[in-house]
Image (cartoon, grey):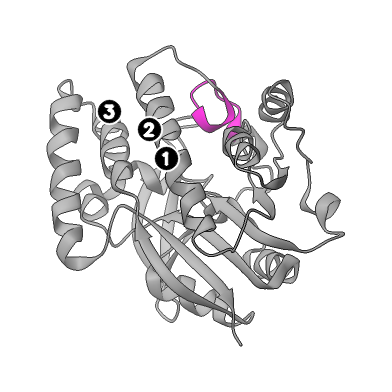
Amino acid sequence: MKLFLKTKDFSVSGETFELFKDENLDMLVTRPQPENLFKYYESEDYISHTDAKKSLMDKMYQVVKRKNLKNKIQLIENQLNKPKSLLDIGAGTGDFLLFAKSRGFEVLGVEPNEKARQLSSQKGIPLSERLEEVADQRYDAITLWHVLEHLPNLDDQIKTIASLLKDDGVLVIAVPNFKSYDASHYGKYWAAYDVPRHLWHFSKTSITKLFDAHGLEVIAIKPMWFDSFYVSLLSEKYKGNKLYWLSAFFVGLASNINALFTKECSSLVYLLKKKK
């Protein structure tokens, strides 16, 4: 593997990390990968583990999150005849599962962060700490919303996830796309690299190859249009731009316009099913 980029952890430690390119998979790999990753999540700014609404950035994140809930559920409902069992891996504070439950799904979730689990439990959505705790059944739908890039021992994790999916079930995975315009524009400042929490950085090729090895095929790829704006906001802040709101809007817009032609949006949602 060849060195692709050097960047740093802008949100917690300030440490420098390197991204290496796996040419066969068309995927970037973060090095080094710390043994104790938990300390890199210990930040009040790690928003997916909170329901914070303090800053404008927090409020924007929460508004976009609410708007995305219906879109996410509709993706799944379009693949199933009726609401069935749903497992959300990396469930955060439980909002997606709460919404899915309101639409008639039987829901279970996994979230390793204790604070996030507590917030979810307060909403009536108890979560398991480890995937092994919910591995006694198979599911009609399994979702990982910006979670796959966080998982160590990637191939083993994919193997386990594939084994939990029913033969006619659907697997939904959302991940950042390092092939996007905003990724190339911001380079080492691109917020979606988010090292070392993001251990892997995917392309369409890598998702296809990784899951094909475990009997799953990509049946559809959908854009996440809001992500380019949110990621650009964070990236501009990392650059120290005082006019980050204005600059981020134009870069996010440029990224989405570019994606209309290249199909390389800032983040992509992959729908996968077991091969017949």
Q: Position of residue 178 (x, y in %)?
A: 33, 58
Q: Which residue is mark 3?
A: 237
The region drawn magenta spans 41-50
Q: Nearer the viewer, mark 1 or mark 3?
A: 1
User: Can residue 147 be seen in this snapshot?
Assistant: yes
Which residue has dot 1 on it? 68
Query: Which amino acid, mark 3?
Result: Lys
Give whichever of 84, 216 is nearer the camera: 84
Quadrant in which residue 21 is drawn: bottom left
The residue under the point 23% across, 46% down is 186
Coordinates of residue 39 in the picture (x, y in percent): 64, 33
Whether tag 1 and tag 3 are in contact, CB under 8 A, the answer is: no
Kindly identify which residue carries mark 2.
64
Q: Which residue is pictured at 73% across the width and 24% down the height? A: 118
Q: Is residue 137 above or below residue 65?
A: below
Task: Give the mark nearest the N terminus, 1 or 3.
Answer: 1
Specify whether residue 45 is painted magenta. Answer: yes
Question: Which SS type dominates the magenta stretch?
Answer: loop
Circles 2 and 1: CB atoms closer than 8 Å: yes
Amino acid type indicated by mark 2? Val
Q: CA distance from mark 2 to mark 3?
A: 19 Å
Secondary structure beneath label 2: helix
Q: Give the Cα distance between marks 1 and 3.
A: 24 Å
Answer left or right for 110 relative to 5. Answer: right
Residue 124, picture quadrant: top right
